């Protein structure tokens, strides 16, 4: 299994801070604009990049990412464009972990083996699929495993102790804790409940890094989560910046990401 | 006794009908889906649950619905049929149910499950508004608050039903995303559900979605086929030769077909909406023009492009205007037990008028598709053969759409 993800989480741990995981929708507003946004994420200090695959029916997403999907598909983004964006990113940034995130149907349309092989060839490190729970793992998990691409699993506030082992079985790369039972970009969970959840997950997850997302918008929120988790995911807030600034978004994205990264760096002082 | 070679023992324990069905949902919903399955298994084994369901169907819904021999329609079709041809046409009259369609059968079953699970809030999606009205009706009857998601475009073309839902106390939320029809309403209902799993029960309106919905909706709707079987034996002394039903998601069709699946002499025909024609691309026929994929919690035939992006469906009938189909139909089609065909907007409109004038029944646009297919096949069948079609909804809600399509100002 490739190890850009584990190397990066280990490096962050050595620096005494949580990893900054950032999400943008691929092809928003056009496929040609995404490279500059990805570079801005890296320049701002993102440790892991989640590249969203647009889908016509993003039923787990709030309005920010729904609109980004519409902008991307409206400008004609194809699956081939996503892989081209990933391939070019890998050439520019050989060491930055890149994860594709999206919904099942675009991933399995040409067959799971095709998708896994394309992802591997493009230098993609992991896949997050919103609507393939462990019960349907056979749809994609074995193909990714064969190709050497991590299948990142999601845990949620509704994932109870009895169910957690099933979620962890086959999970790799990191575990994505969705801190709110809801859709992306809405409210944030209380810090105390996140702390309790992360402790519960860590007790069962062994060495698998625990990354927390959903509703994280401010550097203060990121810092608070960074004190208890191995990583913090910020998505909708970045997607909103791209939505506001379009093909001029890169400097704004970079400045915002730098503010998040700064907050994670200074967490010891805050604590 | 377990019948080994049966078409009626699907899905498997993981909710799969062959390669179709399953539980493709976000992790947040997964524990709830498993709870629902446990509760449904318990309810199925509980004679008190069955008693309450049957009591409500009889005294509140008005079941059994009649089985009716459409003599004038039969004679009219025979006039243009070859000598000796022109099968008898019978209708299962589910348009006479309370709220005017088959949708209420399923809603009664699901609200009893909601009550059993201690849920205190009801949500649903609706296309034509029939499922929304049926859900608002049972929510009022059981005193639960109810939110209905409906595509903004569907709200425009189904205003009477929007008003009905509001009269019944439901909150109707217009959905502005996508093509603003049934698919988008379902996305929005799923977003509500994932944020309110602790107290909310999602009453899905068709035999689709994550397991166990396709199974439980089918079971609740199977009252249609069970009654038809008994009534046909009583009135004609034998089983029908052909069953016909319109298909959007396919709940009225699976409800009629399922009890007959192991009766080898009974052929079955599901009728999809061909909109402006399959070749035009503007249609809602997932089996005729789609490919297997994953949407809204299940794997099934979907209208989609080469990248797996879901295509917009089109049908004059808001209730059929959906780019997918229930997973059991996908399976029945692939194994060849049920045949499927499609009918255009124009053919459905012709059939709508034909039934009005020959039988004095104004059908909904959804079963008008089934009637159009009946008109096509009855002329090819012998006179002593029997067709039983599901008249799954009445057309009051559609008169404005039909008037517009016919160029009539009301």
Image (cartoon, grey):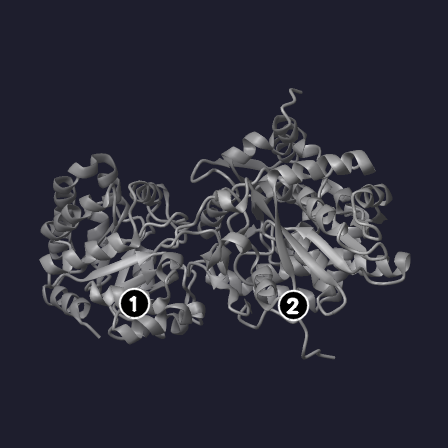
In front: A172, or A248? A248
- Classify residue A78 as left or right of residue B381: left
Instruction: Identify the residue under disc 1.
Output: A116
Residue shown at 67% from the left, 33% from the top: B397
Residue found at the far front of this picture: B83
Tell which of B295 and B409 is nearer to you: B409
> How many residues crowd mark 1 within 10 Å: few (<14), some (14–19), many (20+)?
many
From the image, state whether disc 1 or disc 2 is nearer to you: 1
Asked if residue A174 lies left or right of residue B201, the reply is left
> x%, y% of residue B61?
77, 47
Please say if B75 is above or below B353. below
Which image quadrant is residue B359 in? top right
Q: Position of residue B112 (x, y in %)?
A: 67, 55
Q: Residues within 10 Å of mark 2 (few under 14, many from 20)?
A: few
**Residue beneath disc 2:** B42
Task: Say if A166 sits above or below B102 in the image.
Answer: below
Residue B214 is situated, as x and y percent measured from the top left of the image, at: 59, 60
In the image, is B212 to the left or to the right of A153? right
What's the residue at 11%, 64% (across, down)?
A: A95
Which chain letter goes with mark 1? A
Q: Give the x, y percent position of residue A72.
A: 29, 44
Quadrant holding the C terminus of chain A? bottom left
What secondary structure is found at the residue carrying circle 2?
helix
Closest to the observer: B219 or A82? A82
Residue A225 seen anywhere in this rendered image of the structure: no
């Amino acid at each position: 299994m490739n190890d850009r993800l584990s190397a990066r989480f280990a490096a962050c741990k050595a620096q005494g801070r949580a990893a900054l995981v950032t999400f943008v929708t691929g092809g928003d507003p056009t496929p040609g604009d995404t490279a500059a946004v990805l570079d801005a994420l890296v320049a701002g200090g993102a440790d892991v990049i989640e590249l969203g695959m647009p889908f016509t029916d993003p039923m787990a997403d709030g309005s920010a990412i729904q609109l980004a999907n519409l902008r991307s598909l409206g400008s004609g983004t194809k699956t081939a464009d996503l892989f081209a964006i990933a391939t070019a990113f890998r050439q520019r940034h050989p060491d930055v972990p890149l994860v594709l995130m999206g919904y099942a149907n675009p991933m399995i349309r040409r067959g799971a083996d095709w998708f896994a092989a394309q992802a591997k060839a493009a230098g993609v490190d992991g896949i997050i699929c919103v609507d393939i729970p462990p019960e349907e793992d056979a749809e994609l998990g074995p193909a990714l495993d064969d190709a050497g691409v991590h299948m990142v699993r999601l845990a949620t506030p509704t994932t109870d102790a009895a169910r957690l082992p099933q979620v962890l079985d086959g999970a790799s790369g990191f575990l994505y804790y969705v801190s709110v039972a809801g859709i992306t970009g809405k409210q944030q969970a209380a810090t105390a409940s996140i702390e309790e959840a992360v402790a519960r997950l860590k007790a069962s997850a062994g060495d698998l890094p625990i990354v927390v997302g959903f509703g994280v918008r401010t550097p203060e929120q990121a810092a608070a989560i960074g004190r208890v988790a191995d990583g913090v995911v910020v998505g909708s807030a970045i997607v909103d910046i791209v939505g506001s600034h379009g093909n001029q978004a890169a400097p704004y994205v970079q400045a915002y990401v730098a503010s998040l990264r700064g907050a994670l760096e200074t967490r010891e002082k805050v604590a | 006794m377990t019948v080994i070679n049966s078409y009626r023992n699907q899905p498997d324990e993981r909710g799969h009908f062959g390669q179709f069905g399953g539980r493709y949902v976000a992790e947040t919903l997964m524990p709830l889906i498993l709870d629902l399955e446990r509760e449904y298994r318990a309810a199925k084994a509980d004679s008190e649950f069955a008693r309450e369901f049957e009591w409500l169907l009889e005294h509140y819904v008005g079941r059994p619905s009649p089985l009716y021999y459409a003599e004038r329609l039969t004679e009219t079709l025979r006039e243009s049929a070859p000598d000796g041809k022109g099968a008898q046409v019978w209708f299962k009259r589910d348009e006479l149910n309370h709220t005017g369609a088959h949708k209420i059968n399923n809603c009664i079953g699901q609200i009893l499950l909601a009550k059993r699970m201690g849920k205190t809030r009801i949500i649903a999606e609706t296309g034509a508004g029939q499922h929304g009205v049926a859900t608002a009706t049972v929510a009022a009857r059981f005193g639960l608050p109810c939110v209905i998601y409906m595509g903004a475009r569907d709200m425009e073309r189904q205003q009477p039903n929007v008003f009905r839902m509001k009269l019944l106390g439901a909150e109707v939320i217009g959905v502005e995303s996508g093509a603003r029809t049934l698919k988008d309403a379902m996305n929005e209902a799923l977003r509500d559900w994932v944020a309110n799993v602790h107290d909310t029960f999602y009453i899905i309106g068709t035999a689709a979605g994550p397991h166990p919905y396709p199974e439980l909706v089918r079971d609740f709707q199977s009252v249609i086929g069970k009654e038809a079987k008994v009534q046909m034996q009583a009135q004609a002394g034998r089983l029908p030769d052909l069953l016909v039903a319109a298909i959007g998601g396919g709940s009225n069709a699976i409800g009629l077909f399922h009890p007959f699946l192991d009766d080898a002499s009974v052929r079955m025909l599901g009728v999809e909406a061909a909109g402006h024609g399959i070749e035009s691309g503007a249609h809602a026929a997932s089996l005729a023009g789609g490919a297997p994929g994953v949407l809204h919690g299940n794997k099934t035939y979907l209208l989609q492009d080469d990248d797996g992006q879901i295509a917009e469906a089109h049908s004059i009938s808001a209730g059929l205007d959906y780019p997918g189909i229930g997973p059991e139909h996908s399976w029945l089609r692939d194994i060849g037990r049920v045949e499927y065909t499609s009918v255009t907007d124009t053919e459905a409109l012709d059939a709508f008028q034909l039934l009005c004038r020959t039988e004095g029944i104004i059908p909904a646009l959804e079963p008008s598709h089934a009637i159009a297919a009946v008109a096509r096949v009855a002329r090819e069948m012998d006179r002593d053969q029997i067709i039983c079609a599901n008249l799954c909804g009445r057309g009051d809600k559609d008169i404005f759409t039909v008037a517009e399509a016919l160029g009539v100002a009301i």
